[in-house]
Image (tube, rainbow, N blue to C red):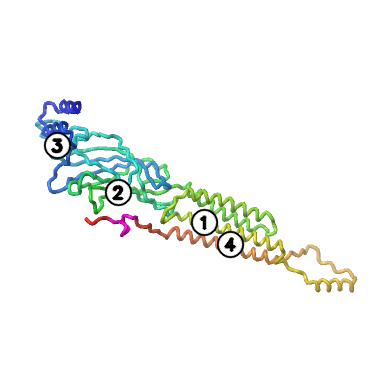
Amino acid sequence: MAILRLLLELFLLGSAWKPLACLDSLLATDISPQIPDNGSVPLIVDVQVFVSNVFDVDILQYTVSSSMLLKLSWFDPHLSWHENTDPRSFITLPSALLWTPDLTIQEALWVEWREHNPRARVSREGFVELYTALTTKTNCDFELLHFPSDKSDCSLSFYAFSNTAQELKFHPQAVNEIVGVKREYVVRGLKAQVPHQQLVPCFQVTLSLENTAVKTTMALVVPGVAILLADICGSLLPLKATERISYKVTLLLGYLVFHSSLVQALPSSSSCSPLLISYFTLLLILLSVSTMESVLMSALLTRGNFSPKISPNLALREEGLDTANPEPRSEEPQGKVQEPKKTWAEAMDHIFLLTYVAIIGCSQIIFVIVWVWWECKSDPPPAKDIPHGGRPDI
């Protein structure tokens, strides 16, 4: 403190600056500076939030990491001086010597301020400007119903708990300074506002994030459609072929591995879970039904339950005719081969294939309609779900 006081005295040597006495008394008493008295109205602090980077979006943990710069400016008439006293138009002072808003981010898991004691710029008229940079990791309630084409709004609420709403008021403004767009989530919108009801001074910055991961879409949707087409092609194999069952079982086991890894990759939610989870679960049910149908029809065909039987009377009658008429039968024309008749199992398998293709087509159309038109309304948070909580009346 003694060194800091000496530097200030050398810095302001030769001038009769009015706030110097206040600074001397502050250094001597170690009392934190108080908010400037603005009479019956609250002190207005203009805030400009420059968002420079959103570098990590984790949908599994529901977190967003970002870097930003805050520019705080307010008017303190007690820090002004006359031109005759000091010709300089502004000076810079450590922020520890002045009153500054003590900001806390409500949604933050951790906050790293670049400078713990940044320097403030004080103009001759008494206007104070303070720049401070920070990196923070905050919680975000992602709307993942249409993942991987989702859009979400993530809020950062800055509170000044050291003051009351009658003492301090913020006028926020957000500026998007993000240059790089080669990332999965991009910031499409940015706004700053002051909540309507507030017990302490606060302002809120909202980031509108949009998922632009084409690779994720191709990696999730294309395999599902390819598996359905492969299953339909497998159903075209003859029912008597033993390769058909092995093909179906192998396809089902491979999809089970894909489905388990997919469920782990997608986030879970108490409400409004991603539609892709329901979509791929439906595919799993269709593949299971198709595999069970092939196994059942093959078993029935092998046991001959549905194969046509020749009547013994008809066989004896044909033998009797051949004995009575020993003349050789007239040979049928060459080149006309009689195709074997389909069994009942094969006919039912063909009907199932047509029905299966129709169900797949209808399910795809229904899924597209639901994807486009369905909007899920999330459950209200406990803070707004009466009687468990709610904002107190002011």
- Percent of width and height locating residue 221: 51, 52
At horizontal 61% and vertical 59% (from top left) the residue drawn is 292
Per the model, the C-alpha gap separating discs 3 and 4 is 81 Å
Callout 4: few (<14), some (14-19), or many (20+) C-alpha neighbours within 10 Å? some
- Residue 68 in the magenta stretch? The answer is no
Mark 2 and mark 3 in contact (Cβ < 8 Å)? no
Per the model, the C-alpha gap separating discs 3 and 2 is 32 Å
Identify the mark nearer the N-term, 2 or 1.
2
Identify the mark nearer the N-term, 4 or 2.
2
Three-letter amino acid code of the residue under disc 3? Leu
Q: Which mark is residue 191?
A: 2
Per the image, label 4 sits on a secondary structure element best described as helix
Main SS, magenta residues: loop
Per the model, the C-alpha gap separating discs 4 and 1 is 16 Å
Callout 1: few (<14), some (14-19), or many (20+) C-alpha neighbours within 10 Å? some
Identify the mark nearer the N-term, 3 or 2.
3
At horizontal 54% and vertical 50% (from top left) the residue drawn is 258
Mark 1 and mark 2 in contact (Cβ < 8 Å)? no
- Residue 386 in the magenta stretch? The answer is yes
Residue that mark 1 sits on: 281
Q: Is residue 239 above or below residue 178?
A: below
Which of discs 2 and 1 lies nearer the camera? The answer is 1
Q: Considering the image in quadrants, where does the C terminus appear?
A: bottom left
